[in-house]
Image (cartoon, grey):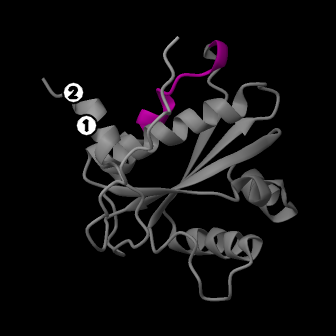
Amino acid sequence: MQNQIIEAMKLRRSCRSFKPDPVPRELVEQVAEAGLWAASGMGRQAAKIVVITDKALRDRIADQNRRIGGWPEGFDPFYGAPVILAVLFDKKAFTGIYDGSLVMGNLMLAAHSLGLASIWIHRAKEEFESEEGRALLKSLGVEGEWEGVGHCALGYAAAPLPAGAPRLPGRIIWA
């Protein structure tokens, strides 16, 4: 018998070309909620998800990410995705980076299960540690000391996603 969750893990791929089509709010809510169900150290739930659907704000964050990454003007590090889910963790949580990484995994698997495409985009740490990033969080009502884990760019794939590469041998050790 095939397990749907394991099959989703095997089939999910990162998308590097999104359609500009908006994603229905109900789907974004389902993806975000799946992130909240990720395991967390001692059950502290120290991660937070900032859902960005406003195009002007999305473009502003994309431009900051582009500058941090060193790409030329006009490059979109979010590959045209209309929705960005920024994952943060409370800096007081010693398991925060792990908790946030599990949230990211849940977001991407949930997106795949709902027919959406996604990709993990880095540089959230640098973004939200900058003066501009801290001001943005404050303007959204996010108080305290938070560190960015990543961005889950979300939308509909503009082209079929590639097949997965074969798994490298010798990565499971039995003792």
- Looking at the rendered structure, the kind of residue marked 2 is Asn
Above or below — where is 73 with respect to 80?
A: below
Residue at position x 77%, y 26% in the image: 93
The crowding category of the residue bearing disc 1, from other C-alpha atoms within 10 Å (few below 14, some 14 to 19, many at least 20), is few
Element type at mark 1: helix
Cβ atoms at labels 2 and 1 below 8 Å apart? yes
Prevailing secondary structure of the magenta residues: helix
Residue on which the image places disc 1: 7
Above or below — where is 46 with respect to 67?
A: above
Residue farthest to the bottom, as pictured: 73
Q: Which residues are magenta?
A: 32-42
Residue on which the image places disc 2: 3
Above or below — where is 142 with respect to 139?
A: above
Residue 51 highlighted magenta (yes or no): no
Q: Is residue 132 left or right of residue 140?
A: right
The N terminus sits in image quarter: top left
Residue 145 drawn at (x, y percent): 83, 39
Residue 41 drawn at (x, y percent): 65, 18
Residue at position x 34%, y 49% in the image: 12
Residue 41 highlighted magenta (yes or no): yes
Location of residue 3 (image quadrant): top left
Residue 32 can be seen in this image: no
Above or below — where is 56 with respect to 12?
A: below
Element type at mark 2: loop
Residue at position x 51%, y 22% in the image: 173
